[in-house]
Image: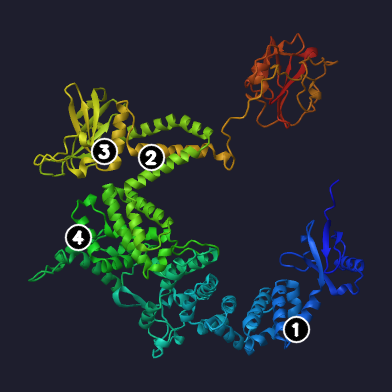
């Protein structure tokens, strides 16, 4: 018999007494339990005692939490919370310092219990604690225990933080700002201020006014990790409590900088109210006009450079003696999110066509790129070009910069995100890395149009990628700990990171030998390069730059292949077997897609001796996949019909396919060297007994892969392009997910489950019974004939379920349909037999239908689908006195 759930066996201790082992009935009042315990020890006045846990936090047992007591718990009989609160309230006022210190220490410990805290607060105990702090006579251990007790009492939210006096707050602030007191007092003071900030606007303003950045930075330089942690907690509390206006009105997230208390800026002047306008500073640095600052924003920026909080964090916390713990990591995440969040307004803002400042920034980009190259309209001696010529040259230069709309480049920046943040990053790159900027633009402007890497388009897309990877604009998380150490080592982190990554785009573009059609693919590779490097958490931008540059395109391909193979190795054996079974079918699907693309045809280009590329020709495969048709074509024409292509090559005459360096047609006659621009896109077909060649230069790498795969299929060879493998992997992955959709979160064993032995007898049969006595389920007995009715009256009304609207149809999954029968249902001799096998294979019986068996005819009386998963049909064969009613029933095995 299981033990009762409302009875627990516990032990109760008391100093100087033998412990009691009792059974605590949870339905019995706690006052009665205490009286029984006190009576056992002959203690009077049981109401002055209480039970509390002997271990852990020593929580008092009340009617509210008594259900938390478990079997085997050890409790202790002690003074009741009310009596204890009364005694401590008196002792903390003692003139004996030792008694006072011990009482405050005990008060700090007991205040963690909500029952005791309520009793102490009801006796106006907080007023005595305020008095101890405000008087400032007690220091050292007494002050530390007092602040600790205050913290624990306020945690229970019985008293509002707004009731604190200014004298108390200023005293706590003084303890936080000075280094003359003990470190434990500084930590407690910082914790009190941290809890005070988010409770009300008044306390936030008061703490922000009294706490100086100098002293907080001092706390970040100490060796005590706990003091660093408390200082960081106060910074993040101030940051999160600030309004959006305050965050915008202070530079780089240091809005909590209390300017009126800064001694170096004592002679500042008022700048007016904040209107949300950005004021350009020097060297691309932006300041803010703010109503909360009494000093110019430029002075604030200079002071911030002098007292840079990021440098203190980077030096003393990230590179400290111990790595940051979980709580410190969360505070670093908050500061990072706040710093990056300052870029969000620019990310959300679109280009304003009426903004003269933004137009000047676009013109500055153009001038910085082409001024050194002497391509500025009107930059030479003599009269400059006319207005039309000037506009034409500007449009040409904006096109070289990579703007999609070269006549109105503002249109490219209308999308938000990334909005104006992309323009800011481009301007920052052109000003702080002018050599790299000019080299990027001019190097690409001298390539062929289809091979140049568009700077503006790449910058816009790269800015969007960085915003997504850095989670710019996402809601703040209360538990996140993901921060990047290099963020705290750089003032303009986002812009500097952009400068590194935009050069990475150009480097990867050249490694991939990309064209304009490969733009999205290149940016996908760049995104992977950045995300992989960010996951390594480099401690500086220099280290990030060195690591991201080692991730070349070939290295990314190698890592992808390794991860794919590792993923396949971790799949269960049955899934791998299923993958191999699906592979031929999906490979055939890829082959058919390649042949279909060849049937649609492609426009190819020719390269003459003078490198002119204006000659075009078209080639396509016949629908029956037997002949290649091709012929010359003018530019701008639509795809010609197959009948208009004069030349053709039978597929049966094709001998081999040459690819890349095996081809001879990309060679220049003057030097005999192969053109690297087209080498990767060339292939040739060798056909006929004379081994003639038909030469191709694919317009893109995509077309190259599809045509070489298709021609290999026609030749009966394996598809070898990377595109074929990629498409096959995608199809296999999708098909596997669809096939295993019902097995999600279910472990698949490596070996199949054992198959049970087949039954000894495979004869399945059903019951034949009178129409009015149809059984609820099929009975395992011999098929017998129903006795004929005694009279020749019409068939009685069947006592059967209502007919199914679908009719009675034989179920192929039934035993009658799946197992051959050697016998048949006996229907009464003279009426012949009805084949169970025939009926089970799908003979549809409907009401009123005429049937005939063994020379007898009749009409189906009723049909139905039995609710017990049994299908049945009834019919009448014969006439007159020999008219019997029969029905057959069978069930699923």
Question: Which circle's residue, 4 or 1, is located before the other in the chain?
Answer: 1
Question: Which circle's residue, 3 or 2, is located before the other in the chain?
Answer: 3
Q: Nearer the viewer, mark 2 or mark 4?
A: 2
**Residue at the disc numbered 1:** 91
Q: Using residue 45 as the reference point, say whether residue 336 is left or right of it.
A: left
Circle 3/circle 2 CB separation < 8 Å:
no
**Residue at the disc numbered 3:** 602
Say which of 648 and 192 sits in front.
192
Q: Count how many numbered circles sit on residues in the image.
A: 4
Q: Position of residue 409 (x, y in %)?
A: 27, 63
**Residue at the disc numbered 4:** 396
Disc assigned to residue 75 = none
Seen in the picture, residue 853 relative to 515 is either above or below; the reply is above
Seen in the picture, residue 333 relative to 211 is either above or below; the reply is above
Question: Which circle's residue, 1 or 3, is located before the other in the chain?
Answer: 1
Distance (Cα) linking label 3 and label 4: 30 Å
Q: Position of residue 604 (x, y in %)?
A: 22, 39
Q: Nearer the viewer, mark 1 or mark 3?
A: 1
Task: Tell me the element at label 1.
Answer: helix
Disc assigned to residue 726 = 2
Question: Which circle's residue, 2 or 4, is located before the other in the chain?
Answer: 4
- Which quarter of the picture shows residue 364? bottom left
Question: Which circle's residue, 3 or 4, is located before the other in the chain?
Answer: 4
Task: Tell me the element at label 4.
Answer: helix
Q: Position of residue 480 (x, y in %)?
A: 52, 62
Circle 3/circle 4 CB separation < 8 Å:
no
Seen in the picture, residue 639 relative to 518 is either above or below; the reply is above
- Which quarter of the picture shows residue 496? bottom left
Distance (Cα) linking label 3 and label 2: 22 Å
Task: Tell me the element at label 2.
Answer: helix
Distance (Cα) linking label 1 and label 3: 96 Å
Q: Nearer the viewer, mark 1 or mark 2?
A: 1
């Amino acid at each position: 018999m299981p033990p009762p759930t409302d009875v627990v066996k516990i032990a109760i201790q008391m100093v100087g007494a033998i412990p009691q082992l009792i059974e605590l009935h949870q339905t019995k009042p706690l006052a009665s339990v205490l009286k029984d315990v006190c009576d056992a020890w002959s203690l009077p006045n049981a109401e002055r005692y209480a039970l509390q846990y002997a271990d852990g936090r020593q929580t008092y047992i009340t009617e509210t939490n008594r259900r938390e007591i478990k079997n085997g718990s050890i409790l202790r009989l002690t003074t009741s919370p009310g009596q204890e609160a009364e005694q401590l309230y008196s002792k903390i006022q003692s003139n004996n310092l030792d008694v006072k210190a011990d009482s405050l220490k005990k008060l700090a410990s007991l205040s963690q219990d909500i029952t005791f805290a309520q009793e102490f607060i009801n006796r106006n105990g907080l007023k005595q604690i305020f008095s101890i702090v405000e008087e400032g006579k007690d220091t050292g251990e007494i002050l530390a225990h007092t602040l600790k007790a205050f913290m624990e009492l306020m945690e229970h939210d019985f008293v509002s933080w707004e009731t604190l006096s200014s004298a108390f707050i200023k005293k706590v602030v003084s303890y936080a700002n000075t280094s003359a007191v003990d470190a434990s007092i500084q930590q407690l003071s910082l914790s009190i201020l941290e809890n005070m900030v988010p409770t009300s606007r008044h306390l936030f303003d008061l703490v922000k006014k009294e706490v100086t950045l100098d002293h907080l930075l001092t706390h970040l330089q100490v060796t005590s990790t706990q003091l660093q942690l408390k200082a960081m907690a106060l910074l993040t509390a101030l940051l999160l409590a600030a309004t959006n206006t305050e965050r915008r009105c202070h530079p780089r997230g240091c809005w909590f900088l209390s300017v009126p208390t800064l001694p170096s800026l004592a002679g500042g002047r008022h700048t007016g109210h904040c209107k949300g306008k950005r004021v350009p500073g020097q060297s691309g640095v932006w300041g803010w006009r703010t109503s909360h600052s009494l000093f110019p924003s430029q002075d604030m920026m200079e002071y911030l450079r002098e007292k840079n909080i990021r440098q203190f964090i980077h030096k003393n916390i990230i590179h400290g003696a111990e790595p940051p713990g979980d709580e410190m990591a969360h505070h670093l995440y908050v500061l990072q999110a706040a710093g990056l969040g300052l870029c969000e307004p620019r990310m959300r803002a679109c280009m304003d066509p009426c903004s003269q400042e933004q137009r000047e920034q676009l013109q500055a980009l153009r001038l910085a790129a082409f001024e050194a190259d002497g391509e500025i309209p009107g930059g030479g001696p003599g009269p400059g070009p006319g207005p039309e010529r000037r506009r034409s040259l500007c449009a040409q230069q904006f096109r070289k910069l990579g703007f999609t709309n070269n006549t109105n480049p503002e249109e490219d920046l209308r999308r938000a995100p990334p909005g104006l943040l992309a323009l800011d990053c481009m301007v920052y790159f052109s000003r702080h890395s002018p050599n790299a900027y000019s080299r990027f633009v001019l190097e690409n402007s001298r390539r062929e149009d289809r091979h140049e890497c568009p700077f503006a388009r790449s910058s816009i897309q790269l800015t969007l990628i960085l915003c997504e990877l850095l989670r710019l604009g996402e809601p703040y998380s209360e538990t996140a700990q993901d921060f990047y150490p290099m963020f705290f080592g750089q003032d303009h982190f986002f812009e500097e990171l952009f400068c590194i990554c935009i050069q990475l785009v150009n480097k990867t573009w050249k490694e991939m030998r990309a064209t304009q059609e490969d733009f999205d693919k290149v940016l996908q590779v760049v995104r992977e390069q950045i995300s992989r490097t960010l996951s390594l958490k480099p401690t500086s931008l220099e280290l990030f730059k060195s690591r991201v540059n080692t991730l070349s395109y070939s290295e990314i391909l190698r890592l992808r292949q390794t991860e794919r193979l590792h993923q396949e190795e971790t799949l269960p054996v049955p899934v791998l077997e299923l993958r191999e079974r699906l592979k031929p079918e999906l490979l055939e699907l890829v082959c058919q897609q390649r042949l279909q693309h060849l049937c649609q045809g492609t426009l190819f280009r020719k390269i003459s001796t003078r490198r002119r590329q204006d000659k075009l020709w078209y080639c396509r495969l016949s629908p029956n996949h037997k002949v290649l048709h091709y012929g010359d074509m003018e530019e701008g024409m639509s795809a010609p019909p197959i009948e208009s292509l004069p030349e053709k090559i039978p597929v049966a005459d094709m001998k081999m396919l040459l690819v890349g360096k095996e081809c001879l047609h990309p060679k220049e006659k003057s030097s005999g060297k192969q053109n690297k621009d087209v080498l990767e896109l060339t292939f040739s077909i060798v056909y006929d007994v004379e081994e003639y060649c038909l030469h191709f230069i694919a317009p893109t790498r995509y077309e190259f892969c599809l045509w070489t795969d298709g021609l290999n299929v026609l030749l009966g060879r394996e598809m070898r392009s990377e595109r074929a493998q990629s498409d096959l992997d995608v199809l296999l992955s999708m098909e596997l997910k669809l096939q295993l959709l019902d097995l999600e979160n279910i472990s698949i064993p490596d070996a199949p489950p054992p198959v049970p032995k087949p039954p000894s007898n495979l004869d399945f049969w059903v019951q034949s019974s009178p129409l009015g006595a149809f059984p609820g389920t099929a009975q395992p007995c011999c098929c017998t004939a129903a006795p004929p009715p005694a009279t020749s009256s019409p068939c009685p009304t069947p006592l059967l379920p209502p007919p199914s609207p679908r009719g009675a149809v034989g179920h192929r999954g039934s035993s009658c349909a799946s197992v051959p029968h050697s016998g048949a249902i006996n229907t009464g001799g003279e009426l012949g037999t009805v084949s169970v096998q025939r009926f089970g294979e799908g003979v549809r019986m409907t009401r009123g239908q005429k049937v005939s068996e063994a020379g007898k005819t009749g009409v189906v009386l009723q049909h139905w689908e039995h609710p017990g998963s049994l299908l049945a049909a009834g019919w009448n064969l014969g006439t007159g006195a020999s008219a019997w009613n029969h029905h057959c029933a069978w069930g699923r095995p």
